[in-house]
Image (cartoon, rainbow, N blue to C red):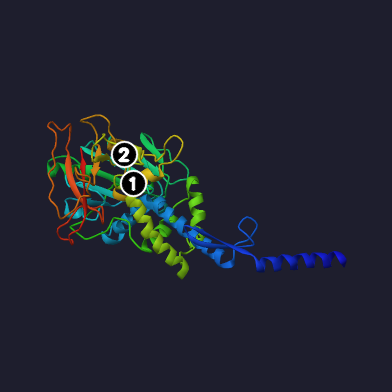
Amino acid sequence: MLKRLAISMAVAALASANAMAEETIDTRVGPLTFTHDFENGYPSKETQQKLFDEMDFQRATQAYIWAIPIVSFAQWQKAHEETFGASSGDIVLYRDTQDKYGLLTANTTTPYALSFINLEETGPIVIDMPDADVRGATHSMWQIGITQMTEPGRYVFYAPGTEAPKVEGAKVFETPTNSIFFGIRLLAKDKDQQAKDLAGIQIYPLSEIDDEHETKVTEVNHKKWQGWQPRGIGYFEVLADILGREPVAERDRFFMAMLKPLGLEKGKPFAPDERQKKILTEAVLVGEAMAKANDFFNPRLEQSHYADGSAWEIATTSPVDQRWENYDALDGRAAWFYEAVTNDTAMQSKTPGQGQIYLGTYRDSDGEWLDGGENYTLTVPADVPAAEFWSLTVYDVSTRARSSTSRSSPTSRRAWIST
């Protein structure tokens, strides 16, 4: 009895002390109140909720940056299916500039033949490539390169965690994601030859390898569509949908943990409450602001350095596998995929006249941001070292897609040159 009485008195005394003493400290997230003092006290109920809100907001902004590659591909896959009416394995043909108005940083020089393939629907898939003048590759939904598709032959792709098929004479690849992207550019100058090259590409399930095949080709025909990442809560709606359909990579497990208190959890419907919606919506705004700072002429990305004193920078700031020696290219891939899609070794050539190199600029020679209401003069040195082509294209900052006079004129644009 005496022992219990002593414990009760001690608890009562502590409670009395806590009621009389508390400390409020000023921080960048506002005042935070603790019982007694910060070192020895507990956060007040109001402070605890404020800290939870701040944790969720900060994590959501970083999840925005982390998710940029998969959200833009998922948005594009949605257009592939819903806007163009293409099924898994169908090719969508983007012939000209108007077809590409929805596409992040497309060039206007060559037609694109592109497809999304859902291996969960089809099982292992076969792509037969003809001997043709094409350039392209396959990619995971995180935009990690799987293989180039420039050599003629038979390619087989199977879903992660499933048994590898044995196909004589084929190149066989396990994919990191259930859906994959196939994209090529038709480089033949003659349109009839382009059509012949395209007709030679066959995409079909491995189970139909002994059948006759004719890959369906759908034309964009100048339909309006959006390939850039959505704004507002729509960003996380697209993210929740694609994460629900794809496996979680080991390197992404912490991000999945950070998204769980925000109502985004694999295997469960995404139905955020009002608190979560408010945090997520604001996080998309701040996350995109961070993406802009990270992308447009960012001196913190040493991989983007082109030449001292130049306003131009190397745009492809991530390796194809998105991995450096001791870390993954979190900011580098966000900088590239905020404004572009796909990455390939041929897009990072260091040999003049071979492959491609992508340079971007967002400022003029005086260091001022490019503005759609101004006129600029571009000086190109003689003897541009391009074996196939080089192009200069201007894009809207708002969409990172090709500028269109049919859209309302942007107040700010940035230029991009590719060779």
Q: Residue at x 13, y 47 (%)?
A: 376
- Give above or below for 303 relative to 91: above
Nearer to me, 74 or 183: 74
Nearer to me, 250 or 168: 250
Which three-letter amino acid code belongs to the residue tagged 1? Ala
Nearer to me, 337 or 286: 286
Q: Which residue is mark 1?
A: 335
User: Looking at the image, can residue 204 be seen?
Assistant: no
Which three-letter amino acid code belongs to the residue tagged 2? Ser
Q: Residue at x 22, y 61 (%)?
A: 224
- Give above or below for 236 relative to 91: below
In percent of width and height, residue 14 lies at 72, 65
Name the disc covering residue 304, or none: 2
Nearer to me, 253 or 15: 15
Q: Secondary structure at mark 2?
A: helix
Q: Residue furthest toward the top?
A: 351
Q: Earlier in the sequence, mark 2 or mark 1?
A: 2
In percent of width and height, residue 324 lies at 42, 36
Q: Secondary structure at mark 1?
A: helix
Callout 2–callout 1 Cβ contact below 8 Å: yes
- Give above or below for 19 relative to 196: below
Q: Residues within 10 Å of mark 2 (few under 14, many from 20)?
A: many
Tell me: 237 left or right of 43. Answer: left
How far, Cα to Cα, is label 2 from label 1?
10 Å
In percent of width and height, residue 229 lies at 32, 56
**In the rendered picture of this protein, how many numbered marks are placed on residues?**
2
In percent of width and height, residue 323 lies at 41, 38
- On the image, which quarter does residue 345 sit in? top left
User: Looking at the image, can residue 234 be seen?
Assistant: yes
Quadrant in which the N terminus is drawn: bottom right
Q: Residue at x 39, y 41 (%)?
A: 322
Quadrant in which the C terminus is drawn: top left
